[in-house]
Image (cartoon, grey):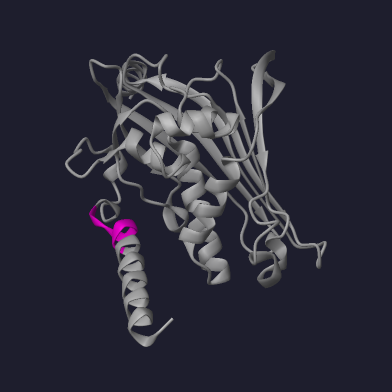
Amino acid sequence: MNNINKSIYYNRLFILVLLIVIFFASGSYGNPNQELDQDFTNAENAEEKRAKWGTEQFKLELIKEMSSANIALFIEEHLKSINEPSRIYYKFKKESTREDNFVGNVVLNIVKIDDDNTKHITFRYLKGRNKVRFPPQIGAKGNPVFMLFFERDARDMQRLTGGNALFFRSRIRHTIAATEIKDIEISFQGESILAKEISFQPFTQTELKNRVSRYKTKKFVIIMSEDIPGHIFKIETFIKDLEDPDDMVKETLQFQGIRTNKELRQEYNKRKEKG
């Protein structure tokens, strides 16, 4: 590659990285109360984002070419059965030998439902110094909480390794595209229900394993069920350093329940009446 071509290549690379940085640092991250706002001026198109996360092509190409895991995550309409404004609650738990352990909450707030049954969504993803701000979404059919989990995870790996979050997201996305689902049963509220498990390890065949040994066998497990509102029951990552057996990290996001906005208002009014 001659000097001119090199210059063009690095200029384009710089512009790409700059655009990514601007995207993740932009406007909607600045308001700490944004997840409860109903201002969708800067909202993302949820289905466009979900399609791009799953593949570089649009949905028809994804259905033709991609795995059952990709279809389950990026095509199925996880929010179809939710027909009134509601909040879906998840618990996030981190266990680590290198950093502080913590437990937090993630809330997916379905603010509005359009005539075509697509949703307007805002998010509250943890609190305090662990909080991650995500822009609202419009036109949502699928549950975006798994993408939020992946995006936070990619940023966390970038922070810990000095690598590029774009690389980590790309490896996760492409590994899902080659992963098939496994039918299982899970226990929920004392009952056994049908579910599917998506399990994959994005970094076993990449240069990352030569740079950061603790990520060699990092494993993602996603459990989904149509009997769970929003379909996402649990997402888990687990790391155990092969060179240091005492070094481990486990993060879990698990469904806790759903409440309609009507129910939440009724509960609030009852508490208010009691003093």
- Please indicate whether residue 57 sits to the left or right of residue 243 in the image: left
| Magenta residue span | 22-27
Which residue corresponds to the image point at 58% horizontal and 33% vertical from the top-left? 67
Q: Position of residue 230 (x, y in %)?
A: 47, 24
Q: Residue 245's image quarter?
A: bottom right
**Residue 269 belongs to the span the image colors magenta:** no
Q: Position of residue 176 (x, y in %)?
A: 58, 41
Which residue corresponds to the image point at 30% horizontal and 69% vertical from the top-left? 15
Which residue corresponds to the image point at 20% horizontal and 45% vertical from the top-left? 42
Task: Give the vertical position of 256 relative to 158 (above or below).
Answer: above
Q: Main secondary structure of the magenta part?
A: helix
Q: Nearer the viewer, residue 52 or 211?
A: 52
Q: Position of residue 195 (x, y in %)?
A: 64, 21
Q: Position of residue 1 (x, y in %)?
A: 44, 81
Which residue corresponds to the image point at 45% horizontal and 58% vertical from the top-left? 129
Task: Give the vertical position of 274 relative to 11 (above or below).
Answer: above
Q: Residue lying at the far bottom in this picture: please name it.
A: 3
- Please indicate whether residue 261 sits to the left or right of residue 167 in the image: left
Q: Quadrant of the C terminus?
A: top left
Q: Nearer the viewer, residue 114 or 209?
A: 209
Task: Give the vertical position of 92 relative to 1 (above or below).
Answer: above
Q: Nearer the viewer, residue 37 or 234?
A: 234
